[in-house]
Image (cartoon, coloured by chain):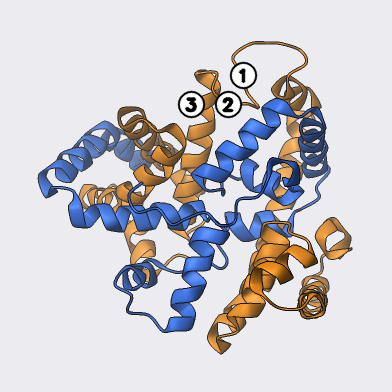
Amino acid sequence: MASEGDRLLIQQIRQGDQRAWETLIARYEGRLLAFVERRLRDRATSEDVVQETFIGFLNSLPHFDAQRELQTYLFTIASHKITDHLRRSGRHPLHPASDHHGDVLQQQLDLHPAASSLARSQERRQLESDAVVRCLGSIIQQWKERGDFMRLKVLELLLVKGWGNRDVAAHLKITEQQVANYRFAAVKKLTEKIRAAGLPPDIFPQLQD
Amino acid sequence: MANRPPTHGLRSMAKITREQLHGYLEDCLSEAETAQVEQALRESEPLQRMLRGLMQERDRGEHSVGAIWCRERLSCPNREQLGSYLLKALDPALQDYITFHLSTVGCAFCQANLADLQALQKEPAPKAKERRRRFFQSSAGYLRVCHTGK
């Protein structure tokens, strides 16, 4: 969720307040530049991409949900701009400049459904994603407040990195049984919350294992 | 990126997971892990097939909980905590978790925030000011469009 300061800033920017826009740039340009430079490894190009990110933000501002966290939204725009740049320069392994039919990009584009069904699908996906953010976000917040960082580490490695129980146990120096117990309890809790939010858990394959 | 944390979480190319591919599509991976995945994609047909399958699943409306977790930064420390982390002023358990999040998970967003905080201590102020001025000048016209809707 956006902070009170960011919400006020967005409100002022929507009213055309130039000083608010300057403030937003000063607040976020450094971290965006570091994020982009990590991928592009070229300062001047990275600055161009950050510039495009800010312009992209203003263009999308009428559709921006002020409840969303501003920083996350800006990183998402920057990520799209990075992909655009890598695609244009033929440096993206999924988006090579050649039109070789065997490449993954070509097949990715071919696999995309029609625009109207994609738009419907995107809207539904966003609603489902928002529900996970609420459910999982509250669980993670509880772990943090309790100082239960081992549980958080286990679930982050399992769900975010996709490690197996054995690797997680070895890395964190706990037993595989402990890892399995943590996984079982977290998946159960999350599945219950997702059901309570009115969503079918089977759209989340990781919760079916 | 200065003083980037070590990436203990990097694994061998043969062990690239579906979730790493999700992370790659979401741009959540560290610089080193991104390079590792890209290299593996260039060299491995099965991995490319896995990626295609994964994209089809996304099109069918399936979700990766892990991808949502990293994209929405559900466990990321906030900026103030990262600042305190640099000063080693946090509770040891939280300090340890943030090290894990930065190095083992390799969160690209938090690494960028940390790099920015470190750069703020080193970069001459006039240079940053000049860069911000350029960003502002190149975008201020869109601010008017955004306001008036024209």
Depth order, front residue of B80/A80: B80
Q: Residues within 10 Å of mark 1 (few under 14, many from 20)?
A: some
The residue to which callout 1 is attached is A96
Please state the horizontal and vertical placement of residue A194, each as a whole percent of the image: 78, 70
Q: Is residue A68 visible?
A: no
User: Which of the marked residues, 3 or 1, is nearer the chain's N terminus?
Assistant: 3
Residue A182: mark: none
Which chain hosts label 3? Answer: A
| Of residues B48 and A201, the one drawn nearer to the viewer in this rendering | B48
Q: Which mark identifies residue A85?
A: 3
* Measured Cα–Cα span from mark 3 to mark 2: 9 Å
Relative to A198, B100 lies left or right: left
Residue type of the residue flagged with mark 3: His
Tell me if residue A133 can be seen.
Answer: yes
Residue at (69% x, 43% y) in the render: B21
Q: Residue at x 24, y 39 (%)?
A: B136
Indicate the secondary structure of the residue bearing disc 3. helix
Tell me the quarter of the picture where residue B117 sits.
bottom left
Q: Position of residue A75 (x, y in %)?
A: 47, 48
- Give the alpha-carbon distance from disc 3 to disc 1, as whole Å: 11 Å
Chain letter matching colour blue: B
Q: Which residue is mark 2?
A: A92
Residue B118 horizontal/vertical position (percent): 28, 56
The residue type indicated by label 2 comes to His
The Cα atoms of the two marked residues, 2 and 1, are separated by: 6 Å
**Marks 3 and 1 share the same chain:** yes
> What chain does badge 1 belong to?
A
- When the figure is inspected, residue A154 is found, relative to residue A69, above or below; the finding is below
Q: Which chain is drawn using orange?
A: A
Residue A102 at x, y percent in the picture: 78, 16
